[in-house]
Amino acid sequence: MSNTWWTSDTHFGHRNIIRYCDRPYSSVEEMDEAIIKEWNSKVGLEDLIYHLGDFSFYRKVDVAISLLERLNGDIFFIKGNHDSDQFLKKAMMSSSVLGVKDIHSIKIDDPDAPHGKQRIVMCHYAMEIWDRAHYGAWHLFGHSHGTLPDNLDKMRLDVGLDNHDMKILSYEDIKIAMFRRGYKAIDHHNPKEQR
């Protein structure tokens, strides 16, 4: 049985991210290997993982591709501001990469969700409003490295490594995080007041 996972902002090869985000590594090489180890310890060969942007900082695309080839699972990329078109184009030639989008919406079977399906809207950037938020859709994003203030009135979550002790997240991890959140309408989309 396959599982689904989420992460963002791996920043492979980015020396300064260690200092900027206080990552617990002494070198880029140590960081890269630790992220690969975390990824492969959770993600199985037939699992699906959504990477929500900023995969690598390596200028040589072939170096980034060689890291990609060491990772388990089928990968769907949500494009980040540091993901070059050249890298993504070459990554799409890999049999493990299923697609690339700027924004993507899926439904996950979940008996606890409305109508047994949990809708998830993914983008590299945090949104204030997203499709079907007023009906319980979740929004997953990255980019902010845990610096965006958490808002418990929004069913959204920063899935970036820096926001979760360098851990990749399962659906259950995200569901637990969403359990303590709610939805407070900030526009006319209030399901209790639908006309």
Image (cartoon, rainbow, N blue to C red):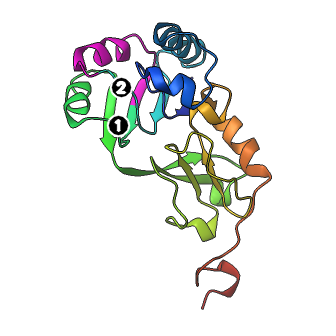
Q: Earlier in the sequence, mark 1 or mark 2?
A: 2
Q: Residue at x 59, y 13 (%)?
A: 25
Left or right: where 85 falls relative to 182 = left
Q: Position of residue 55 (x, y in %)?
A: 40, 29
Q: Which is nearer the eye, 131 or 152?
A: 152
| CA neighbours of label 2 inside 10 A, class few (<14), some (14 to 19), many (20+) | some
Q: Position of residue 45 (x, y in %)?
A: 47, 15
Spot the residue most to the bottom. Answer: 195
Task: Check contact, mark 1 vs mark 2: CB within 8 A.
Answer: yes
What is the quadrant of the N terminus in the image? Answer: top right
Q: Which is nearer the eye, 7 or 116?
A: 7
Spot the residue most to the right. Answer: 180
Left or right: where 114 falls relative to 72 = right
**Residue 82: mark:** 1
Is 139 contained in the magenta span?
A: no
Disc 1 is placed on an element classified as loop
Is 67 contained in the magenta span?
A: yes
In the image, the segment drawn in magenta is 59-75
Left or right: where 106 falls relative to 160 = left
Q: Residue at x 68, y 27 (%)?
A: 165
Q: Which residue, given by chain and number where applicable, does mark 2 sit on?
A: 57
- The residue under label 2 is which amino acid type? Phe
- The quadrant holding residue 159 is top right
